[in-house]
Amino acid sequence: MTFKELLKKDLDTFVNPKEFAELHTVDGVEIMAVVDKYTQAKSGSESKTFPVLHGDFVEVCFKTSDFVAAKERLPKHGDRIKVDGRMYTVENCENEHGITIIILNAYRQSLTKAASKIGRSEDYD
């Protein structure tokens, strides 16, 4: 058995609710997925264009065939999708050997940092 064949065989283990996955709603599709949420501080990422923006990031992994059966295509960079009721923008979406990995972001502005840029942080603390 080849490595790729082993990966395909293990897909069901990865998306098994007794192992890693839980039921999530991704772009209107209820699907077994592994969702990892983290903040910008943990990700090490920063908005270079708008330094007062902070982001919440989500990595979503699921079995590609389950999602495509319902939606006919995977999301692409720039698409806006909801995960468990929260809106995100797709940063990256890759299909790796039958598992889709989507990196999503939801930027929000820090009022304290924005106000300090204009010298009025006391108005927003």
Image (spheres, helix red, strand yellow):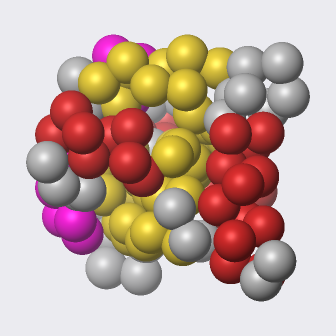
**Snapshot quadrant of residue 66:** top left
Near-viewer residue (117 or 42): 42
Near-viewer residue (56 or 122): 56
Above or below, comparing residue 59 to residue 8 in the picture: above
Q: Position of residue 64 (x, y in %)?
A: 42, 52
Residue shown at 79% from the left, 32% from the top: 20
Q: Position of residue 56 (x, y in %)?
A: 52, 44
Near-viewer residue (79 or 111): 79
State the predominant SS element of the stretch in magenta. Answer: loop
Q: Position of residue 80 (x, y in %)?
A: 18, 46
Residue shown at 65% from the left, 61% from the top: 8
Residue shown at 68% from the left, 78% from the top: 4
Q: Which quadrant does the C terminus fall into?
A: top right
79 inside magenta stretch: yes
Magenta stretch, residue numbers: 76-85
Q: Which quadrant does the N terminus fall into?
A: bottom right
Q: Is residue 38 left or right of residue 51?
A: right
